[in-house]
Amino acid sequence: MSPGDIRSVNLELLKRDDTPYDIPPGRTKLAVRKRVRRVPDGDLQRLFEEFPIEQPLRNQCALRFHAVAGNHFFPDANHRTAVTTLREIITQNALDEYVTWPTEPLVDAIKESNGFGRQ
């Protein structure tokens, strides 16, 4: 997976009609697409170069998710981009037993990280 692949995942999420992509007021999809394309390759490349591969797989998955979602590289869909790219990395490395995660804990984690699950 390359920086361009991560960017492409986010652009695909922007195109989809079945999941919302938050377009800021006064902006168009075209303007958002241009902004996504301007995310520097170097910023995304650091996800690979500085990744702690000596960590257990579970920790690597959590760190990968946090690195993509937490850095907010894109205007929206950072969590979905993180999940999609993480699943692709797992599939590419023949770790398919980890791909079929239940979605409910994932949705809860996203809500919590966005502040929606806090009392």
Image (cartoon, rainbow, N blue to C red):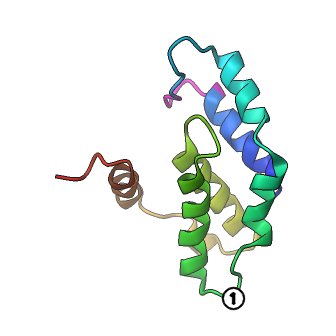
Count of picture labels = 1
Name the quadrant of the N terminus: bottom right
In-front residue for pair 61/75:
75
User: Is residue 57 rendered to the left or right of residue 92?
Assistant: left
Find disc 1 in the rendering and name its residue: 54
Which quadrant of the structure image shows residue 109?
A: bottom left
Q: Magenta segment range?
A: 15-21
What x and y, as percent, mark residue 8? 76, 40
* Residue depicted at x 49% and y 28%: 20
User: Is residue 88 rendered to the left or right of residue 3?
Assistant: left
Farthest left residue in view: 119
User: Is residue 19 rendered to the left or right of residue 107?
Assistant: right
Let me know if residue 18 is in the magenta part: yes
Q: Main secondary structure of the magenta part?
A: loop
Instruction: Say few, some or many: other residues with alpha carbon within 10 Å of mark 1 (under 14 / 14 to 19 / 20 or more).
Output: few
Which quadrant of the structure image shows residue 33?
A: top right
* Residue depicted at x 25% and y 51%: 117
What x and y, as percent, mark residue 81? 61, 48
What x and y, as percent, mark residue 51? 71, 74
* Residue depicted at x 72% and y 29%: 35
* Residue depicted at x 47% and y 64%: 101
User: Label 1's element?
Assistant: loop
Which quadrant of the structure image shows residue 47?
A: bottom right
What x and y, as percent, mark residue 46? 77, 63
Let me know if residue 31 is in the magenta part: no
In-front residue for pair 41/60:
41
**52 versus 109 height, above or below:** below
Farthest top residue in view: 26
Task: Identify which amino acid the numbered label 1 is placed on.
Answer: Glu
